[in-house]
Image (cartoon, rainbow, N blue to C red):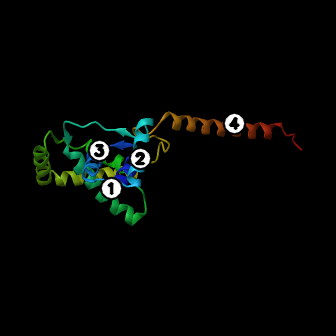
Amino acid sequence: MSIEKIVEQCLQDGYLTPAMEAEVGRICNMTSELSVEEYMALDRLMEALLVGEVTVLPRKQFINVMEELVVSETIARVAEIEAKEHKVLDIGDIAAYALNRLPPLYATTSEGADFQRSLAREKLQDLITQKVKEAIAHYLEQPEFFPERQILGKSTGGEILAALKHILSEDIQSDATTLKQSSQPDL
């Protein structure tokens, strides 16, 4: 992956993962001279980190292998549905629902993660598939209760202020319309 694509992904997600950070370091170490575009992308990333638009995720000492297995299964199933039905489904909501119904598979080493993946594919793949299907069915049955809800880690003070300003301006316009209509004489 190129530096520009990594920075674009960071800006989109709001996070710089340890893997992304390592890849940028690897590219910088392997290249004798960066291009102007690469420097500009790194400058944009630095700016985003400084203002808090992008957060650096800490390196974990452990991983839950079940997360990657469920997300992979969810992406595959959701892609099928979105292609057929022209709907957009929330992968995060679906994966979280399924993960809450599956056992965690934590590992602290690469070898441990490989062991957990192998074990899960051997003994839990059918259960993973079943829980992802249940999660999708549950997601599709739910009405959209709170369409204005905020994704974890995505809201900033500026966004909240802008949302409040928008809500207040709508209320003021609504009140002004009501007042204008009530002050007109009946004919």
Q: What residue did someone put label 2 on?
A: 11
Q: Pick whichever, 159 or 97, lies toward us.
A: 159
Tell us which disc is closer to us: 3 or 2.
Answer: 3
Q: In 3D space, how far apart are the residues under numbered discs 2 and 4 (Cα atoms)?
A: 35 Å
Tell us which disc is closer to us: 4 or 1.
Answer: 1
Is 39 rendered above or below residue 76?
above
Instruction: Give me the residue at 19% from left, 38% from top.
Output: 62
Q: In 3D space, how far apart are the residues under numbered discs 4 and 1 (Cα atoms)?
A: 48 Å
Tell us which disc is closer to us: 3 or 4.
Answer: 3
The tag earlier along the polypeptide, 3 or 1, is 1
- Residue 57 percent across, percent down from the top left: 31, 38
The tag earlier along the polypeptide, 2 or 1, is 1
Residue most toward the bottom? 84
The quarter of the displayed image where residue 180 is located: top right
- Residue 45 percent across, percent down from the top left: 40, 44
Q: Pick whichever, 132 or 118, lies toward us.
A: 118
Are the two marked residues, 3 and 2, in contact with CB atoms closer than 8 angstroms?
A: no
The tag earlier along the polypeptide, 2 or 4, is 2
| Label 3: element kind | helix
Is 4 rendered above or below residue 154?
below
- Residue 54 percent across, percent down from the top left: 40, 40
The tag earlier along the polypeptide, 3 or 4, is 3
Kindly identify the amino acid type of the residue bearing the numbered disc 4: Ile
Q: What residue did someone put label 1 on?
A: 2
Q: In 3D space, how far apart are the residues under numbered discs 3 and 4 (Cα atoms)?
A: 47 Å
**Viewed as shown, does residue 173 lie left or right of 91?**
right
The tag earlier along the polypeptide, 4 or 1, is 1
Residue most toward the right? 187
Q: What residue did someone put label 4 on?
A: 172
Tell us which disc is closer to us: 2 or 4.
Answer: 2
Mark 1, Cα crowd under 10 Å, few <14 / some 14-19 / many 20+, is few
| Label 2: element kind | helix
